[in-house]
Image (cartoon, coloured by chain):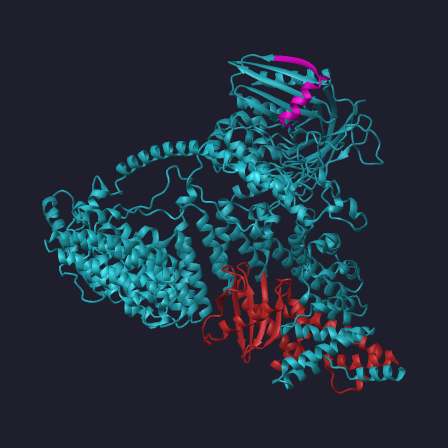
Chain colours: A red, B cyan
Amino acid sequence: MIKAILIFNNHGKPRLSKFYEHYNEDTEQQIIRETFHLVSKRDENVCNFLEGGMLIGGSDYKLIYRHYATLYFVFCVDSSESELGILDLIQVFVETLDKCFENVCELDLIFHVDKVHNILAEMVMGGMVLETNMNEIITQVDAQNKMEKSEVMCFVTFINQCPCLDICSMQGHCFAFHTASASR
Amino acid sequence: MALKIVKGSIDRMFDKNLQDLVRGIRNHKEDEAKYISTCIDEIKQELKQDNIAVKANAVCKLTYLQMLGYDVSWAAFNIVEVMSSSKFTYKRIGYLAASQCFHESTDVIMLTTNQIRKDLSSPNQYDTGVALTGLSCFVTPDLARDLANDIMTLMSHTKPYIRKKAVLIMYKVFLKYPESLRPAFPRLKEKLEDPDPGVQSAAVNVICELARRNPKNYLSLAPLFFKLMTSSTNNWVLIKIIKLFGALTPLEPRLGKKLIEPLTNLIHSTSAMSLLYECVNTVIAVLISLSSGMPNHSASIQLCVQKLRILIEDSDQNLKYLGLLAMSKILKTHPKSVQSHKDLILQCLDDKDESIRLRALDLLYGMVSKKNLMEIVKKLMLHVDKAEGTTYRDELLTKIIDICSQSNYQYITNFEWYISILVELTRLEGTRHGHLIASQMLDVAIRVRAIRVFAVAQMATLLDNAHLLTGNMQRMGICEVLYAAAWICGEFSEHLENPMQTLEAMLRPKVATLPGHIQAVYVQNAAKLFATVLKNQEGNTDSTAAQETSQLMIDRLPLFVQSANLEVQERASCILQLVKYIQKLQQKDVEVAEEVCALFAGELNPVAPKAQKKVPVPEGLDLDAWINEPPSESESEDEQPKAIFAKEEPKHSRPRHTEVDEKELARRREARKQEQANNPFYIKASPSSQKAYQEAPGVEHIPVVQIDLSVPLKVPGLPMSDQYVKLEEERRQKERADKKKKEKKKRKEKRSGRGRKHDSGPESEEDITPAHMVDIVTEEMPENALPSDDDDKDPNDPHKALDIDLDKPLADSEKLPVRAHRAAEAPKSPAEDGEAENAASQEPKKKSSKEKREKKKDKDRDRKKSKEEKKKKKHKHEEKGEDLLGGQADEPVVQSEETNEVAALPTSTSAEVSDLDFWLSNAPVPSNTQEAATVAEAAPVPEAASGTAPDSEPEEPKDTEMEETKSSKHKKKKQKKEKEEKEKKKKKKHHHHHHHSDGGGEESVQNGTVEEEEPLPPMSNYCLLAENSYIKMMMEDADEVYDIQGNLQDGSQVVVSVIFENKCDSFLKSMEFNVLDSLNSKLQRPEGSGPHDGLTVPFQLPPGVSNEARFVFTVQSIVMPQKLKGTLTFIVKNEDSSTHEKLDFKLHFTCTSYLITTPCYSDAFAKLLESGDLKCSSVRLEGVIMPFHHLLARICFHHHFSVVERIDSCASMYSRSIQGHHVCLLVKTSGQTVSIDAKCDEPTLLGNVLDEIKQTFSQC
């Protein structure tokens, strides 16, 4: 089982946190801080596993992480997961993000955390690995985005002409428009 | 006003969306909190809007804020609103928010049930998908119960996307609602063979997760997983399965044997490191589970170690880490094979990666030997010096101590060295483990008598240099060692070289800065030292020295008397007064030393840490019993004084208690003395330890110390352990040289005798003699200590509830709750839990308490079983029996071990269990699925196939199914069989169980559970029905009853299982089974067929194959046995021709076959007998020469009885007919005569049953 998935940057700012077990907000922040503390002080070329901190898990749990440019991707897993398998999964996750955002960078994650959540939901569900095939994940994510888009289209067609085709920002515009039209 | 509203909504047009929020937060770095709080206010406004889009936007922003650590639970209701939007866009936002911040105590969750159900059944797969994803994060017991059925339906959804998610979420449902596991499991199992690899992988995932926690329940799936393992190419699935096997092998060593080969192949063939690693891991698990003795055992270990070495040598740190991790698993069982890689592991200690160093440290723990301990620890000490001020250093410190102290200091040859190591460790800055070092010092000094002189000297130095340890506040952790030092110096002060100096060191004013508990020890031990000093000084005639010492005490102690610490103060003032008194005596020239010493006389023995817990409760002492009756509740408040008064009364009984105890104690003391006297390891200083203490240097009495060090070990200041290493080396060399010399001599003497005797190559472990012949005093344990170590399992573990037997067929009552009938669903074992009738009150709390109760019951039962061998109760699970007798039917959790195994209804599940055994006992993988496709579980087929040529059977242990299929050859094989029986004595239960499961029907468990006296001869209920050159039919009537009421009008049903065995070389097909119905008994035919039509047997038989079919008969009256004539027609197909053939047979329905084994409790049984409406009859059997328990087992097995109670050679038995007649037996044996008194409400039936019993025994 995966207990938590955390993404934070080199300064420990959370970019995504997904806990598959309930903690209150304070504990969550504490876990993120502690994990950051553990992970950030490690050199680049050391192994990607470390025995979990006091807060999360216990002896059965491990932190498995990868560091990409400015971001840390940390999975907290128990002994039923294969360590190397999870490393691969992180790789798949990042590659998927890269495909979905086209050259993903930290900013994408900052502004579209909901999208990242949606992608993650196609890979891991309730702490268990759902899908590891990148193409399958992308297909499903795209299909849902398309659906979302078609719902948006019903309301505003002119946005098609809008040069930015980013779904999320479009969604935002759409909210505003929709609100305005509804309240009139 | 209206204008205002319009204006408001125009404002809203410019509402922030998520991106704006993020941007805003980034732009307000200085006053982020303030900015966010205004944002939250805005969000609150937005949530008040009716517009769902606005709400969704607000919820989206809240989700982001939640990630930043803001509590958004106040918006839970709004989240639910957004979840229930019909638009996917909003729904997704809502579910995401819910998954991030809902949890079990969120109260609005209960509002979501219907919405989620709606979404689950939505035609849009993504609506369903989003709902499932969300639900997986916040499922509660209520949701799980209400939605289990819906989710189960989704497991067979047409879209693999949904199936996959539904399968995965089932795990969460099981966790929250354990009752759903059994009903849902068959479908889950189906999904293992789903065409979609994603679904398959999800199912594997879930089952692995379940099995990891309760592996024994999933053993029966091993063949299926084995098949998957050999066929799957998906590495994810493979890894999971292999991990699962790793969890299963400890339970079933035979599985391990089977696994080794494919796993080894995988190890050789795979290129994926992850898979390779898991394979190695599981092979290790297999090797651990197999007790050594397997021939190619070492090859597998070698392979593993070799592969791991490659991993460790890899430049990839991850592989290195994992390699070390796996290595440590091998280490536990095969330390030798790891030790050869010591170089590599020591190398890893130098790795820059801390995780790797820690792993390497773990490995070192198991690698030390007497030979290399010093060397390894030396190396570690170097690391300690390097790793200044890190947690890693603390880790190193604990590891050093662990390594040295493991298994009772087994590897330490030189304790002086160890003490100096400990002293060296005290010089570490800022370690947290001062207390650990201290306890080691104490332990060694107390338990290793020979070392005390040295230890005391070292401790005195430590005390002298105490200022080094207490220099700054940071070192407070380490000052714990002063505690040990002070105590050791005080307790063993007779060994002190210069007690006066130490005494002064202990009374320095600086001591007052130490923590209270250490000061207390200082004060107490200063007194001990004082006593010693006095004694020494009184020997000299100069009395002034002694008086000066007293004066010193009197001067210094007041410092401690003023201490804020109570303990210190108390001790100090007490001792101060004492010393003052002593001084007074001294001034009168009275010799006091003797008396003062007597204050501290006596030896302290080490007591094992668990000793207290292990003191057995004396017989007749009930710890739970009230000493004083608790005041009854009716007593009002004002009566209380009276109650207090009344408490005085029971005091009378107390002295009596202690008296008993004292007697007991005295007895035990005696026993202990005896034991100690006989124990060679327990060294007493002298016959009377007290005297020895006073006689001072009692060291000579210890027959040990022979310090043969060439250099005197007077190291000034603090000792250096390194010197010991050198010395040790020298010593060993010298020893070796000595040995060689001796050997040479010997060789010279024996040159003619033996050629080469002992190669003095590298010295072996045993060659190293310890520097000190050290006696390690074992820790004391109470007599009759209970050996059991209670394993503490976390009672809160949710997986505990999932420990459910899955092989048992489902009972009717086990259904997932369906929406419509929630109030009346699933009544659980009505007789047992009367209160459960109100199904609406299915709160989880109640459930758990119920389970607990049941578990307790189980435990009780086990205890009873073990304790009273004579009294036996039978707890057999029954599928569809009447619950007349208060037995626990339909309760999945109630199973004790035995019943667990014997869930033997003639359904596919029972076949499966025996399949597992078959599968495990047979080396080759069955390759028969094609032919036997008609039957779900066809594993026994090839077995039976070999039955056609019984003489050419392979020698390997056969499975018992075989026996059944060839009961005609039974006798021939009996001898062989019995041999096997002996071999498998351990697995006896298992073994018998074959008979049952195969014998179909609810055979009695008796022969499995009756006794452990001796193995029972194998029994089978199959009898030859008919046989010709083509086919053999064997019949067994498995009485499976459907009508619980036993209603005559409805007619009861009897199931007959027939094994068809093809004995010829041709293919048999189109088999038709027909029976001439009598008035009383009719074969049940499918609807629409005439009364004389035959039933098609649902399979074909290739040559040599056998298979089993079941036929259901309706029976009107069961009081008489009857015979039915029947025919089997079939086509024999050769390559060129095919012929019609026919076989006649007679089906014999005995009255016995109408009986069902029904458990009955003695109280219910007694009531039944008392009721008086039973008719009596009896029968007498002569010349029965089998043991009584065999006799009972036979009755149980062949006649479907169960033992109610057995007392010596007398037993009461019970059974019930399918129409509800009670049959009670009282079986008595004396010599070779067995008399059976029977009672039944149907005399004809009884008569016939007795006749049949008689016949059974006349046959043997």
Residue B817 horizontal/vertical position (percent):
75, 48
Residue B720 in the image: above or below residue B995: below
Position of B581 compared to B1066: left or right? left
Depth order, front residue of B707/A154: B707
Q: In which quadrant will I find the C terminus of chain B?
A: top right
Depth order, front residue of B218/B780: B780
Depth order, front residue of B109/A163: B109
Tell me, yes or no, if residue B490 can be seen here: yes
Residue B206 in the image: above or below residue A175: above
Give the quadrant of residue B233. bottom right
The reply to whether the magenta stretch includes residue B151 is no
Position of B237 compared to B740: left or right? right
Tell me, yes or no, if residue B368 can be seen here: no
The reply to whether the magenta stretch includes residue B1178 is yes
Residue B1185 horizontal/vertical position (percent):
51, 17
Residue A23 horizontal/vertical position (percent):
61, 64
Q: In percent of the image, x 75 and y 63: which residue is there? A: B128
Depth order, front residue of B122/B786: B786
Residue B585 horizontal/vertical position (percent):
19, 51
Number of labelled discs?
A: 0
Give the quadrant of residue B943. top right
Q: In which quadrant will I find the N terminus of chain B?
A: bottom right
Q: Which residues are magenta?
A: B1160-1179
Give the quadrant of residue A93. bottom right
